[in-house]
Image (spheres, rainbow, N blue to C red):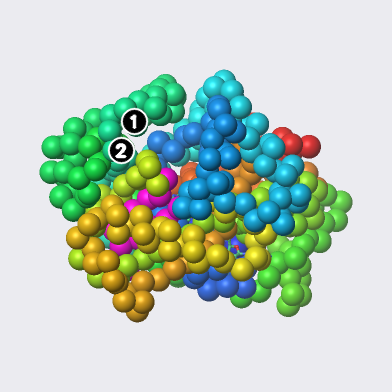
Amino acid sequence: MSRHVVVIGAGVVGAASAIEALQDGHRVTLVDPAEPGGEAAASYGNAGWLSSHSVLPPTEPGLWKKVPRFLLNPLGPLTIRWAYLPRAAPWLLRYLAAGWTTARVETTARALRALLEDAPRLHQALAEKAGVTQLIERRGVLHIYPSRANFEAEANAWRIRRMMGVQWEELNADALHQREPDLHARYQFGIAVDEAGSCRDPGAYVAALVAHAQARGAQLVRDQANGFRIEGGRLKAVTTGGGDIPCDAAVIAAGVRSKLLAARAGDRVPLGAERGYHAVIDQPEAGPRTAMMASDCKAVATPTSTGLRIAGQVEIAAVDAAPNWRRAEILRDHLLSLFPRLPRDIPAHRLRYWMGCRPSMPDGLPCIGYANASRDIIHAFGHGHIGLGGAARTARVVAQLLSDRAPEIPLGPYAPGRFA
Ligand SMILES: Cc1cc2nc3c(=O)[nH]c(=O)nc-3n(C[C@H](O)[C@H](O)[C@H](O)COP(=O)(O)OP(=O)(O)OC[C@H]3O[C@@H](n4cnc5c(N)ncnc54)[C@H](O)[C@@H]3O)c2cc1C
């Protein structure tokens, strides 16, 4: 059954969903007011990790004890705009609750593993279709620690990863520095996760996916979707600023802006923003050979085709609040400290900063499934920290739901109504 599907949002989730829907023989219209692959989307500025092993929710048992220390540290990885706290409080409480017990974390890990397993291979297949295989690296990723004891302090997280089938190699100081000669000597221990991968330019990747969808017949409409026309439980049109787009089905993939659209499709979802930042150094004198997460600064350094990127930070603030570029400068300083051969006085024209919003559900799991108001509308948003990696399988599942086929992974954990 071929349908006319309107995909709302051309970030990585929407772009990949468009390709999978076309593959299934549907007609596709992509709607987005912004340039696909551009800076407005979280998909542009992320760390580029395709981390099939990122199965833990952002919170963990006992995290609440560390929160005051994080918040009091002006250089720390977590910050809250205090004026926003009353609005964020219900979301924050659920966020902390999601990691309250090890049992809860294990349940989430099982669901995330199903979504993320094979992410690098699935992305490579998408990149092949779009003719940009050079953007997907399948060389693994590293976690680096000052000492083995720091790694052991995360033993519970790694135990859960092992339970989920993740394997890794331990690197002593020699092995680590042989692989990463530019890395600061204070890092004495590493973990190499070979099954993971990375993207060399997430913005260019999304732009290429959208261009490929267009080459296969998808129409791109530069407009903002604002709701649905539903009659007798069947979707008749997606409404936009420029008028109605008649269609048989729709996919909500508008990232952090999906909440209102989801409500208009009958689902009240506690979608929030975990704002993050990146800093990029153009033509770096030194840097990592492999994308790496530094455990002490909770940031990821990734070699990209547009420079050396470091991404991270969680800032709880309104989606539209002005960026606090101090957070990006903190990341830049981490980069300088990770790689001592980088000059201390990098001129401003070689530095770029960016802020974007992770579309985050408080339990660390996206919403994927049919909407309450009509099975013609499919939710595909809320991927938080793992949306780049998770987009490829999400898109396959979206196509399966559009074609009324059984989804390839159980969708219970992602039910949009789970907080109702
Ligand atoms: C600092 C940082 C680092 C990250 N690192 C990683 C990482 O290493 N690996 C990983 O897997 N994930 C990472 N993420 C998360 C990842 O970037 C996101 O989860 C993912 O990009 C979300 O994709 P999306 O398509 O759902 O949303 P987006 O990329 O935000 O795209 C949503 C699109 O919808 C459009 N839109 C909004 N409203 C409307 C509307 N009403 N009508 C039509 N269109 C609309 C927007 O213009 C936008 O183009 C990181 C995020 C941040 C901020």
Question: In the rendering, at what x and y percent does residue 18 appear?
Answer: 54, 58
Q: Which residues are magenta?
A: 298-312
Q: Residue at x 30, y 43 (%)?
A: 141
Residue 304 among those drawn in magenta: yes
Please state which of residues 3 and 292 is positioned toward the viewer in this rendering.
292
Q: Magenta region, mostly helix, strand or loop?
A: strand
Quarter of the rendered structure image containing ligand 1: bottom right
- Horizontally, residue 54 falls left or right of residue 196, namely right
Q: Earlier in the sequence, mark 2 or mark 1?
A: 2
State which quadrant residue 337 falls in. Answer: bottom left
Count neighbours of disc 2 (C-alpha within 10 A) and say few if under 14, some if 14 to 19, many if 20 or more.
many
Q: Is the shortest distance between ligand 1 and the CB of mark 2 under 8 Å?
A: no
Q: Amino acid at mark 1?
A: Phe
Could you tell me the amino acid type at mark 2? Tyr
Give the Cα separation between the discs numbered 2 and 1: 6 Å
Mark 2 highlights which residue? 145
Q: Is residue 58 magenta?
A: no
Tell me: is circle 1 under 8 Å from ligand 1: no
State the residue position of label 1. Answer: 151
Residue 408, compared with residue 103, is above or below; it is below
Q: Quadrant of the C terminus?
A: top right
Tag 2 secondary structure: strand
Percent coordinates x, y for residue 96 in the rendering: 63, 35
Q: Quadrant of residue 208?
A: bottom left
Name the residue rendered at 18%, 36% in the picture. 173
* Dots 2, 1 in contact, CB < 8 A: yes
Could you tell me which secondary element the residue under label 1 belongs to? helix
Q: Residue furthest right?
A: 232
Residue at (42% x, 45% y) in the render: 298
Q: Position of residue 192 (x, y in %)?
A: 26, 37
Number of marks present in the image shown: 2
